[in-house]
């Protein structure tokens, strides 16, 4: 098996690994990137429904879960969303803005990937695909990386292997084993940005139905999350952006189950009096028709049946107490849920290498010299909306920049 020596070795060819290699290879530092797949890119081609929601106008540590919010703040102080947009502008990649989300103007993820690969080639990054890193150890002051394609040496190593999400295609979790062999400890690992399973099966017949709603997550009686978004009913429970964001909070809590409160009015009626006054304007309308055009009839039929209200009654014939029941049932529909535990259906991994073992200013290990981390392998997970790609790129920039300094000064 051949041996080759580089300044920096990057393990993992996803967004964090690609960005790490680009910035590590500035000023003629020699960089090799290993990726176990047939081509580098990781999950980048499929993000944002293949449109590549690359970042968000509003970035805050509150959009992330993990063991240390200050860590996130330090990361974005060094490479922000504006820095990312400027980087791609320099690569002649224009953006389209939808609300607070940024996409390439082409709305194709391959636009982003092509620009990044071109930059890697310009910087002479050696890309070795179908190369799984099997072992990393330190020998005579250099890192020795044993891969399925040979044995390589470097002065610094950046681990960007991602997590366990999309486990069948991407997330083997191999990076955690390498980190453990070097003295690091991953925290608990759970699926994130995933769906909820409904434990009672009340809405199983509504699979495919969608509507905008306000989702609140309660864990052991305490509300920990609230967000408005598109709610999707599935065969097993619920999905949609707000649900997936809520799933991160349940995952990081370590609990198996929780209660979600759904406001099917999506905040339109904040109190009963407003709802009642609106309803009573059309006294002749049947209860079964009061939500026509705003809430799917298949959903309203289930809820009205559950609270045992006669749907054939007219509004004017219905007692105010019954209308109060209707209001509460739709304004605060409480459902018991469990986290979907399938990593292959999760978009991110909650948990990872503990942030108290990583210097947020450099992404260097506090335990092992010249070892760096970037991306999903770190114990930070973001919400839907470009937050995870931004974290991958930001940590990749920091790791690559600092590893380059190490590699150039210590290479023998």
Image (cartoon, rainbow, N blue to C red):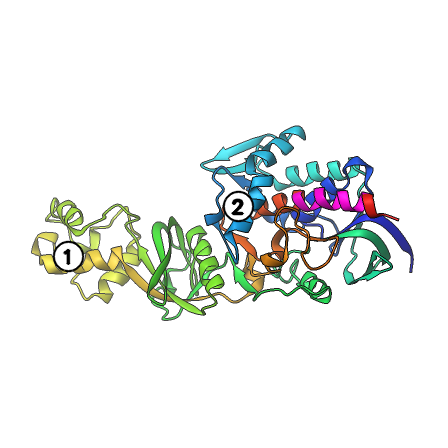
Q: Position of residue 322 (x, y in %)?
A: 13, 60
Mark 2 closeness class: few <14, some 14–19, many ≥20 residues within 10 Å: some
The residues colored magenta run: 398-408
Q: From the viewer's perspective, is the residue at label 2 or at label 1 nearer?
A: 2
Question: Is residue 400 part of the magenta span, yes or no?
Answer: yes
Q: Residue at x 8, y 56 (%)?
A: 317
Q: Position of residue 329 (x, y in %)?
A: 24, 60
Q: Identify which residue, 138 or 214, lies in the foreground.
A: 138
Identify whether 106 is placed above or below 175.
above
Say what secondary structure mark 2 lies in: helix
How far separated are the C-alphas under marks 2 and 1? 47 Å
Q: Identify which residue, 171 or 10, lies in the foreground.
A: 10
Residue 48 in sight here = no
Q: What residue sits right under mark 1 in the picture?
A: 323
Q: Which mark is residue 73?
A: 2
Q: Residue at x 18, y 60 (%)?
A: 325
Q: Which mark is residue 1?
A: none
Mark 1 closeness class: few <14, some 14–19, many ≥20 residues within 10 Å: some
- Which of pointers 2 and 1 lies earlier in the amino acid sequence? 2
């Amino acid at each position: 098996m051949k041996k080759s020596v580089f300044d920096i070795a990057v393990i993992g060819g996803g967004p964090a690994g690609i960005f790490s290699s680009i910035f590590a290879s500035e000023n003629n530092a020699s960089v090799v990137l290993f990726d176990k797949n047939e081509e580098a890119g990781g999950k980048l081609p499929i993000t944002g429904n293949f449109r590549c929601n690359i970042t968000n106008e509003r970035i805050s540590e509150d959009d992330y879960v993990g063991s240390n919010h200050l860590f996130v703040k330090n990361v974005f102080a060094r490479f922000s969303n504006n820095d990312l947009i400027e980087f791609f502008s320099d690569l002649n990649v224009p953006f389209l803005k939808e609300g607070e989300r940024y996409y390439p103007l082409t709305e194709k993820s391959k636009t982003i990937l092509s620009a990044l690969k071109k930059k890697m080639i310009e910087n002479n990054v050696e890309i070795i695909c179908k190369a799984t890193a099997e072992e990393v150890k330190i020998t005579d002051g250099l890192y020795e990386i044993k891969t399925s394609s040979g044995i390589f040496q470097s002065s610094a190593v950046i681990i960007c292997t991602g997590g366990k999400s999309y486990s069948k295609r991407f997330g083997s979790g191999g990076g955690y084993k390498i980190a453990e062999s070097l003295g690091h400890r991953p925290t608990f690992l759970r699926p994130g940005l995933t769906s909820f399973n409904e434990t009672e099966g009340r809405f199983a017949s509504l699979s495919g139905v969608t509507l905008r709603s306000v989702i609140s997550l309660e864990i052991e009686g305490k509300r920990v999350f609230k967000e408005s978004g598109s709610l999707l009913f599935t065969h097993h429970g619920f999905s949609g952006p707000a649900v997936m964001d809520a799933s991160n909070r349940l995952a990081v809590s370590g609990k198996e189950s929780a209660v979600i409160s759904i406001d099917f009015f999506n905040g339109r009626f904040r109190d009963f009096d407003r709802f009642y006054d609106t309803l009573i304007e059309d006294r002749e309308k049947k209860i079964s028709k009061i939500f026509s055009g705003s809430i799917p009839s298949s959903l309203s039929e289930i809820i009205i049946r559950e609270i045992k209200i006669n749907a054939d009654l007219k509004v004017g014939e219905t007692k105010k107490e019954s209308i109060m029941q209707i209001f509460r049932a739709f304004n605060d529909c409480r459902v018991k849920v469990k986290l979907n535990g399938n990593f292959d259906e999760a978009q991110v991994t909650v948990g990872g290498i503990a942030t108290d073992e990583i210097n947020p200013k450099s992404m260097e290990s506090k335990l092992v010299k010249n070892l760096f981390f970037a991306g999903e392998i770190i114990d930070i997970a973001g919400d839907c909306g470009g937050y995870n790609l931004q974290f991958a790129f930001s940590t990749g920039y920091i790791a690559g920049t600092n590893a380059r300094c190490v590699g150039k000064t210590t290479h023998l």
